[in-house]
Image (cartoon, helix red, strand yellow):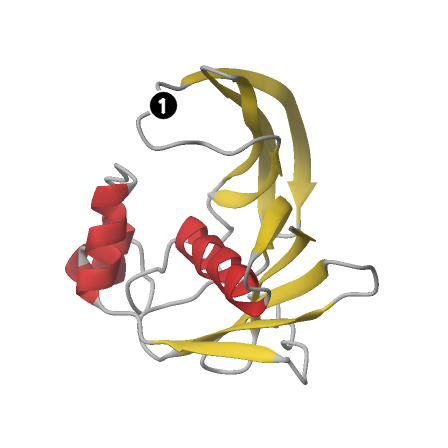
């Protein structure tokens, strides 16, 4: 599962640039969670172009064992109140299929309803974690037009299904250019939280 990620932006990427990515497994950690064994993997991607380094991404992945039968699900956390900016998103089969194609993600939980409900046992199609993060990053840019994003970090804390609209939310943080962002599921639960740092020109 894609558990989260962090980006540090060094310089702009220009259309037509030839980019080079070097990926490194930075850390592997095993833990025993409430529902069984967990393995956390951090992969670092360094991306450079003709003018040097442009960004670094840390990709947080979690591998989990199957939960024991009868293991109760943890109650979801509630989303924060009083966002300054929001955007409603209606997930559907087309959006999820197109994002899967865009990101070369072949996992059937995002586009095959019969598979995800009958084999995986989920109530509906699962909205991609990176799609939620992409929507949050876009909201951050829209909230501070003309600014440049210098850092972005996100962490998945719940699951969003395509059964109801959800909200991407944003409010100003404590520091200059800091934004606090989150995804609120259709039931009011917190699905993802993120921080962005914006720099005005």
Specify whether 38 is left or right of 51.
Answer: right
From the viewer's perspective, is residue 138 above or below residue 164? Answer: above
x, y percent for residue 179:
69, 62
Specify whether 74 is left or right of 178.
Answer: left
Q: Residue at x 80, y 59 (%)?
A: 176
Instruction: Answer whether residue 119 is visible to the viewer in this image.
Output: no
From the viewer's perspective, is residue 83 above or below residue 113? Answer: below
Specify whether 137 is left or right of 32.
Answer: left
Q: Secondary structure at mark 1?
A: loop
How many marks are shown on the rendered structure? 1
Instruction: Answer whether residue 49 is visible to the viewer in this image.
Output: yes
Name the residue tied to disc 1: 17
Q: Residue at x 30, y 26 (%)?
A: 16
Q: Nearer the viewer, residue 87 or 176?
A: 176
Tell me where residue 11 sits by quadrant. Answer: top right
x, y percent for residue 186:
45, 80
Specify whether 201 is left or right of 188.
Answer: right
x, y percent for residue 48:
50, 18
């Amino acid at each position: 599962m894609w558990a989260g990620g962090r980006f540090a932006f060094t310089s702009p990427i220009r259309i037509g640039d030839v980019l080079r990515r070097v990926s490194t497994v930075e850390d592997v950690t095993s833990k025993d969670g409430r529902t069984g064994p967990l393995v956390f993997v951090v992969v670092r991607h360094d991306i450079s172009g003709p003018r040097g380094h442009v960004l670094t991404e840390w990709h947080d992945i979690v591998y989990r064992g199957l939960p024991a039968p009868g293991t109760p699900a943890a109650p979801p956390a509630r989303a924060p109140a009083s966002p300054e900016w929001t955007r409603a998103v209606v997930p559907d089969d087309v959006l999820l299929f197109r994002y899967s194609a865009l990101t070369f993600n072949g996992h059937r939980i995002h586009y095959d309803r019969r598979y995800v409900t009958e084999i995986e046992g989920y109530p509906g199609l699962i909205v991609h974690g990176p799609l939620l993060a992409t929507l949050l990053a876009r909201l951050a840019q829209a909230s501070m037009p003309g600014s440049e994003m210098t850092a972005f970090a996100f962490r998945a804390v719940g699951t969003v299904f395509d059964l109801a609209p959800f909200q991407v939310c944003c409010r100003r943080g404590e520091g200059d250019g800091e934004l606090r962002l989150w995804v609120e599921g259709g039931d009011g639960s917190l699905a993802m939280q993120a921080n962005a740092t914006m720099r005005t020109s």
